[in-house]
Image (cartoon, rainbow, N blue to C red):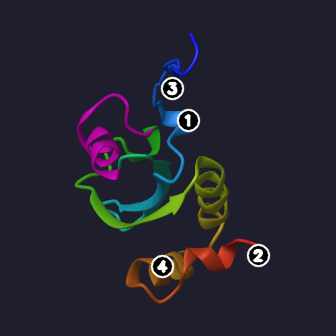
C-alpha cells in the first residue's frame, strides 16, 4: 500500500510510563509525624492510605491523616530520588517544605 500510513499500535499508559505525571507528597499523622511517598495520582493514593489495604503499613492506625503537601515533579526517577532524600531530612526541614519555605528541587543536583 503506497501513500497510506499504517496505524501504529497505541502504547497503553501504565503507572511506570506516565512521564511528567509523578508527584511527591507528605502526609501528616495524628501524632504529627510526616510520611513521604510518590504516586501518579495524589488524591487516589491518599484515599488508599486512609481506607484501604493498599495503604502504607507505616500509616496504619495513625489517623486521622492529613495531606499536608504535594508537588508534581515530572518523571518517576526524579520522584523516587526526591522521596529518598526527603525521607532522610530532619523534621524541621520537612516542615519547611510543607510551609513552602524550602523547595524540594534544592535536593537535586543540577
Q: In percent of the image, x 42 and y 64: which residue is there?
A: 33
Q: Which mark is residue 11?
A: 3
List the residue tagged with mark 1: 16
Dot 1 falls on a residue whose secondary structure is helix
Q: Is residue 76 above or below residue 12?
A: below
Crowding at label 1, few (<14), some or many (≥20) Cα neighbours within 10 Å? few
Q: Is residue 22 above or below residue 71?
A: above
Dot 3 falls on a residue whose secondary structure is loop
Q: Name the front one of labels 3 and 2.
A: 3
- The disc, 3 or 2, on the residue closer to the chain's N-terminal end is 3
Q: CA distance from mark 3 to mark 1?
A: 12 Å
Q: In percent of the image, x 46 and y 45: which residue is there?
A: 58
Q: Main secondary structure of the magenta part?
A: helix
Q: Which mark is residue 97?
A: 4
Q: CA distance from mark 3 to mark 2?
A: 31 Å
Locate the N terminus and report the quarter of the image it occupies: top right
- The disc, 2 or 1, on the residue closer to the chain's N-terminal end is 1
List the residue tagged with mark 2: 110
Relative to residue 69, is residue 91 drawn left or right? right
Q: Which residues are magenta?
A: 42-56
Q: Position of residue 36 (x, y in %)?
A: 49, 57
Q: Is residue 80 above or below residue 45?
A: below
Mark 3 and 4 residues: CB-CB less than 8 Å, in contact? no
Q: Position of residue 77 (x, y in %)?
A: 66, 50
Dot 4 falls on a residue whose secondary structure is helix
Dot 2 falls on a residue whose secondary structure is loop
Q: In percent of the image, x 46 and y 56: which residue is there?
A: 23
- The disc, 3 or 1, on the residue closer to the chain's N-terminal end is 3
Amino acid at each position: 500500500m503506497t501513500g497510506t500510513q499504517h496505524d501504529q499500535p497505541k502504547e497503553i499508559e501504565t503507572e511506570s510510563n506516565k512521564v511528567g505525571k509523578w508527584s511527591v507528597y507528605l502526609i501528616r499523622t495524628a501524632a504529627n509525624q510526616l510520611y513521604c511517598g510518590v504516586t501518579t495520582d495524589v488524591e487516589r493514593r491518599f484515599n488508599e492510605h486512609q481506607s484501604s489495604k493498599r495503604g502504607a503499613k507505616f500509616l496504619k492506625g495513625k489517623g486521622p491523616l492529613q495531606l499536608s503537601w504535594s508537588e508534581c515533579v515530572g518523571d518517576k526517577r526524579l520522584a523516587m530520588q526526591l522521596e529518598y532524600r526527603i525521607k532522610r531530612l530532619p523534621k524541621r526541614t520537612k516542615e519547611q517544605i510543607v510551609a513552602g519555605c524550602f523547595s524540594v528541587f534544592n535536593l537535586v543536583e543540577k
